[in-house]
Structures are given as structure tokens and as C-alpha cells.
Amino acid sequence: MRVRIIGLGTNWWAAHSRDLNDPFCFRRNAAWFNSAGLMYGRRLRMCWAFPGQLRFNLTSNFDPERPLRSVGRTFECSEPNFFGGRMHLLFRLPVSGDAPERFLVTLNERTHGRILFANSAWRSDGVQPISVSVRGARYEAMVLIGATDWIETEIGRWILSTDGRRIELEIGASERIA
């Protein structure tokens, strides 16, 4: 499956190889993880309503010192799978020239408006949550969407832009704003 990253979550962590005698154990065989989280001042809170994570291995050419360089890029990924109580999405290799099949989008209440997660009509059938953190009215949701999928918030319906680089608020059939 080819996935273009439009947005990443707030929460980052890493796992290194168990061979601490290797001076490059924190780089060579490390894996980097990302998921939804909420910042309160300088504190990160993982208030998972739907636990999940992205995983970047060495083969993905992910640069942990510059994670935002991955935004806008397309990767070959495994199918999302539920394991150990969490949804997992592995980013294997960067790809170029191929059209993405799915898009990783991150939403929050400040930018996109409140989502009523208790109502099953907050998303189209093709939207797949990867990681969702909710605390009171605040949330951060990382979801996979397709080209024709939508997400409903209190502001309106969010859809993928025609160029596949961002999500837009759908106002009418002929006009859209970002």
C-alpha cells in the first residue's frame, strides 16, 4: 500500500537495538515511532481513545532530527494491523512517481473543529483511524483516508484536496477553502 503523509502526530519516541556495544545502536538499527498525543504546556499526555502508532525503520530513510521532511512524501507501507492492543502502520520504503492509494492525515480541534467521536457518522466508511487521543474537548486524530473519503467536524466536512497535498473544508460542490 502506498501512503502519502499529510500530517504527523505530536508524540515521538525511539527504540534502539539491544547491542549497546555498537556505537551506532541508536542510529543504525533504531526504529522511530509516532502517535497522537496532546500537549498541555510542556507535558505530553497520551489520552488514547484509539491506541496506535506509526513505525519508521532504517529502510524508510526517515531522519529523526528532521521528521517534518517526511510530510508530503509517499511511502510503501504494510497494511495497518491491530496487534498488542494497538493499531500499527509500518513505513517501509519511500517511493516516487507512483500515485498514493491512501493519505495519512492528522486532525485537531483547533484547526479542524470538534469531532463527535461517539457518533459513528463522523467519518466515511473508508476512513481508518490509526491513533486518536481525546481529553475533554481536545483531540488529535491520525487517520488514513482515500481520495473520496471525508471527515465531519462541527465546522463542516473535510475532504482531500485535488492535488492530494492537504485536506480542505468542503463548502459546496464548486467551491472549497483550505
Image (cartoon, rainbow, N blue to C red):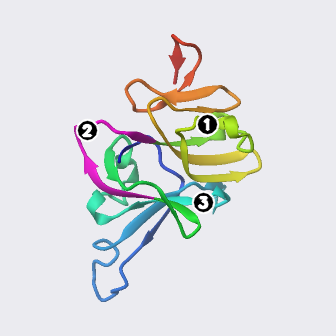
Identity of the amino acid at label 1?
Arg
Query: Of callouts 1 and 3, which one flags the residue occurring earlier in the amino acid sequence?
Result: 3
Distance from Cα at disc 2 to Cα at disc 1: 26 Å
Give the quarter of the image for residue 17: bottom left
Residue under label 3:
51
Q: Residues within 10 Å of mark 3 (few under 14, many from 20)?
A: some
* Quarter of the figure with residue 133: bottom right
- Residue 142 rendering spot, x and y as whole percentages: 54, 48
Amino acid under disc 3: Pro
Work out whether residue 48 or residue 65 is closer to the camera in this orientation and state it.
Answer: 48
Evaluate if marks 3 and 2 touch, with contact meaning CB atoms under 8 Å apart: no
Which residue in the rendered view is the most extreme toward the right?
136
Query: Cα distance, mark 1 to mark 3?
Result: 18 Å
Asked whether, in this view, residue 172 is left or right of residue 98, the answer is right
- 35, above or below 124, in the image: below
Res. 98 mark: 2
Q: Which residue appears at 56% of the width and 21% of the height?
A: 170
Q: Secondary structure at mark 3?
A: loop
Which quadrant holds residue 20? bottom left
Q: Which residues are magenta?
A: 89-103
Q: Which residue is mark 1?
A: 123
Residue shown at the point (30%, 58%) measured from the top left = 60
**Taking 90 as reference, is 139 above or below it?**
above
Q: Amino acid at mark 2?
A: Asp
**Label ID, residue 14:** none
Of the two numbered discs 3 and 2 on the same chain, state the one appearing first in sequence: 3
Provide the major secondary structure of the magenta segment: strand
